[in-house]
Image (cartoon, rainbow, N blue to C red):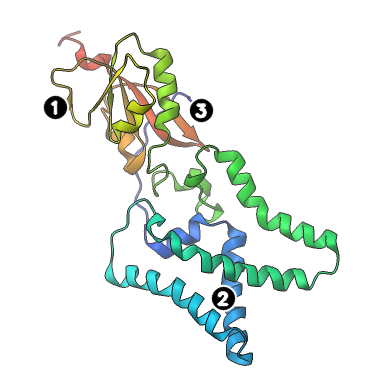
Amino acid sequence: MRFTQAADCPPKRGNFNVPVLIGLQLTLPAILMATIGIGVGTLDALRNGRRRAEVAALIAWLAAPIGAVVLMGSTLYGNFRQLLFITPPLFVFAGITLELLLGRLRSRVAQAAVAALVLAPGILGIAQLHPYEYVYYNRLVGGVRGAFRSYELDYWCTSYREAMEWINEAAPARAEIAAAPPELVASHFARPDLLVFYAQEPDDLVGRDPTLGLGCGRGNNDIGFFPGSPVVAEVAVDGARLAVVRDLHSLRAPAGE
């Protein structure tokens, strides 16, 4: 369980454009090899005519969507997940570089070492971030810790499952739990006797008697989610808060207490 005592910190502003996010969310070997592969593949196609149509199609597959989004100023949600279909050509170009590199190495040991170096950042990221692998950021931004408060991490609020495991153990019978959207994710993992309801503002608590509140770190919402109530637990990975549990008893205290 990744629950620790936590302190709020102010949000920072970040650059959310597609090329930057691609450069920050893919592993460094993948970015380097894809960049080299684009150059190698393009030069080979221009000089020797080899795979000219294939290379042109891959470049168009990659450049057209990115260019359209950048030029039109399109709004995307959840990092570049709406453009995940552009990643195949990137990996094809990375494969061109890997094929060229391995072809120059005759030693199987050297080839295995290169393959291990290429795969290492991704494998380490999976091991470190599980089960939140999709929040991965590379070292160009300082990893997940560096991306925290600047870029979206757990935009699906999958951390609500782990947070609800803590609430299920701590909450009294038939307690009401205030949850910031997507509250349906939280309610799916709640104990049968718990009542999880939508709450984002104080007015949402009218007629309610919540014991605990659950907020997601998406859009730094964990900071604005009833900030006057103390944090009792959080879900965090690599120093980045994904979800926060707050004690809402103080909201029910009579004036003057």
Q: Residues within 10 Å of mark 1 (few under 14, many from 20)?
A: few
Query: Where residue 144 appears, x then y in whole percent?
Result: 50, 45
Q: Amino acid at mark 2?
A: Ile
Residue 76: where, in percent of width, then height? 32, 57
User: Which quarter of the figure has residue 181?
Assistant: top left
Q: Is residue 257 left or right of residue 229?
A: left
Check disc 1 and give the amino acid type.
Answer: Asp
At 28% from the left edge and 66% from the top edge, which residue is drawn? 73
Residue highlighted by disc 1? 203
Which quarter of the picture shows residue 109?
A: bottom right
N-term mark: 2 or 3: 3
Q: Nearer the viewer, residue 81 or 252?
A: 81
Q: Are marks 2 and 3 in contact (CB under 8 Å)?
A: no
Q: Determine the residue positioned at 21% across, 14% down.
A: 209
Look at label 3 and name its amino acid: Arg
Q: Looking at the picture, does residue 134 appear above or below residue 28?
A: above
Pointer 2 or 1: first along the chain: 2
Identified at 61% across, 73% down, the residue is 36
* The C terminus - image quarter: top left
Tag shown at residue 2: 3
List x then y, in percent, for residue 58: 50, 75
Drawn side of residue 242 relative to residue 111, left or right: left
Q: Would residue 12 be found to the left or right of residue 58 on screen?
A: left
Task: Say which mark, if any, is on residue 38.
Answer: 2
x 42%, y 44%: residue: 153
The CA distance from mark 2 to mark 3 is 41 Å
